Image (cartoon, rainbow, N blue to C red):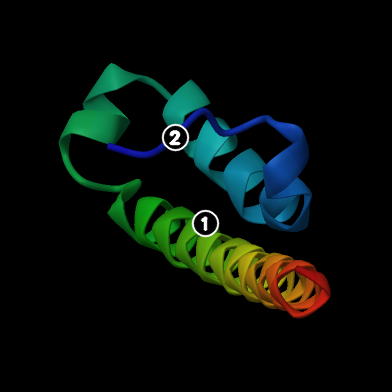
Amino acid sequence: MHPHLHTKNNRGCEEVMAALDECHAQGFLHKILGNCNGAKREVNKCLRAERLERTAKNREKAKEKKERIQRVWKEIDEES
C-alpha cells in the first residue's frame, strides 16, 4: 500500500504516478497480470525518497527547536 498519491507532499513524483495511472487505465487484466508492477515499484521508490527527505527536514527542525528550548531554559536558570 502507498499513501494518497496526489497530495502536495508528492509533487516530485507526478511523472511516475501518471505512468502508473496510465498503466492502470489499460484495464483490469493488464493490471492483474503484473504489467504495472514496474511502474508501481518506481512510485514506491519515489515516494520513499520523498518521505526520507521530509523526515530528515523534520528531524533537523526538531533538533533546532530542542536546542532553542534548552538555551531558553538555561537562560532562565542562570537568571534565577
Kindly identify which numbered label has been placed on residue 65.
none
Q: Check the image and report above or below for 19 versus 53.
A: above
* Pointer 1 with pointer 2, Cβ within 8 A: yes
- Foreground pick, 21 / 6: 6
- Left or right of residue 53: residue 24: left
- Residue at coordinates 29% horizontally, 19% vertically from top-left? 28
Q: In which quadrant will I find the N terminus? A: top left
Q: Position of residue 61 (x, y in %)?
A: 71, 67
Q: Check the image and report above or below for 36 versus 74.
A: above
- Quick one: label 2, few (<14), some, or many (20+) residues within 10 Å? few
Task: Identify the residue position indicated by label 2 in the image.
Answer: 3
Element on which disc 1 rests: helix
Disc 2 residue type (three-letter): Pro
- Foreground pick, 51 / 58: 58
Q: Check the image and report above or below for 11 versus 44.
A: above
- Quick one: label 1, few (<14), some, or many (20+) residues within 10 Å? many
Disc 1 residue type (three-letter): Leu
Task: Identify the residue position indicated by label 1 in the image.
Answer: 47
- Foreground pick, 55 / 39: 55
Q: Position of residue 29 (x, y in %)?
A: 23, 24
Q: Check the image and report above or below for 40 versus 49.
A: above
Q: Position of residue 66 (x, y in %)?
A: 63, 69
- Left or right of residue 79: residue 48: left
Classify residue 62 by image quadrant: bottom right
Q: CA distance from mark 1 to mark 2?
A: 9 Å
